């Protein structure tokens, strides 16, 4: 398991680079999806929860990504696509389009399962 404490967008970038290094040899699509999901979920915590984000990544049959903040930032159960002229509000919708499942618990925060595509 990889574990990160993230308090800035530069720390987020370093965490994404470390996770991608662990995915060496995985298909390009898997690496791209993983980067997008981590970026969107951690960015949401940094923007809406304030303080720090805690990221756990496990590589098994699927990629399990858990993100939580210092406060209890709880995303909506169902994501919706924002209007075309909106400047924000697409991140969770994109995440949900890529993952197999998304759950929430106060202990782990948001947990998603991302398919680990084979070569």
Image (spheres, rainbow, N blue to C red):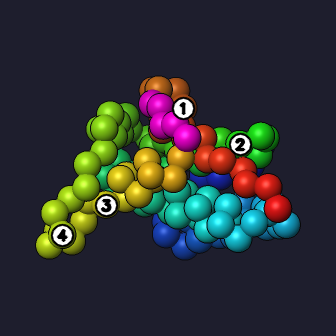
Crowdedness near tag 1: few (<14), some (14–19) or many (≥20) residues, C-alpha within 10 Å: some
Q: Which of marks 3 and 2 is nearer the N terminus?
A: 2
Count of number-bearing discs:
4
Q: Which residue is at the front of the view, 52 or 88?
A: 88
Image height of 16 relative to 5, above or below: below
Q: Which residue is located at x 52 percent, y 37 percent?
A: 101
| Residue 44 visible within the image | no
Q: Which of marks 3 and 4 is nearer the N terminus?
A: 4
**Is disc 3 placed on a helix, strand or loop?**
loop
Q: Find out whether the residues at labels 3 and 2 contact each other: C-beta distance under 8 Å.
A: no
Which mark's residue is nearer the viewer, 3 or 4? 4
Image height of 106 relative to 80, above or below: above
Instruction: Give the residues in magenta.
Output: 100-104
The question of residue 103 being in magenta is answered with yes
For the residues labelled 1 and 2, the Cα–Cα distance comes to: 17 Å
Residue 4, percent from left and from top: 65, 52
Image height of 40 relative to 105, above or below: below
Return the mark for residue 84: 4
Q: Earlier in the sequence, mark 3 or mark 1?
A: 3
Q: Which residue is at the front of the view, 23 or 97?
A: 97
Where is the C terminus found, in terms of image quarters? bottom right
Q: Which of marks 1 and 4 is nearer the N terminus?
A: 4
Q: Which residue is located at x 72 percent, y 50 percent?
A: 116
Residue 115, percent from left and from top: 66, 47
Q: Which residue is at the front of the view, 43 or 77?
A: 77
Crowdedness near tag 2: few (<14), some (14–19) or many (≥20) residues, C-alpha within 10 Å: some
Q: Earlier in the sequence, mark 1 or mark 2?
A: 2
Return the mark for residue 3: none
> Which corner quadrant of the image does residue 77 belong to?
top left
Residue at the spot of label 2: 62
Q: Find out whether the residues at labels 2 and 4 contact each other: C-beta distance under 8 Å.
A: no
Residue at the spot of label 3: 90
């Amino acid at each position: 398991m990889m574990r990160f404490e993230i308090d800035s967008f530069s720390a987020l970038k370093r965490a994404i680079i470390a996770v991608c290094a662990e995915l060496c040899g995985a298909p390009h699509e898997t690496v791209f999806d993983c980067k997008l999901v981590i970026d969107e979920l951690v960015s949401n915590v940094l923007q809406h929860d304030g303080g720090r984000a805690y990221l756990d990544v496990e590589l098994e049959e699927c990629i399990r990504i858990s993100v939580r903040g210092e406060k209890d930032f709880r995303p909506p159960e169902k994501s919706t696509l924002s209007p075309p002229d909106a400047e924000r509000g697409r991140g969770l919708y994109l995440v949900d389009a890529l993952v197999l499942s998304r759950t929430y618990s106060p202990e782990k925060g948001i947990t998603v399962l991302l398919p680990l595509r084979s070569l």
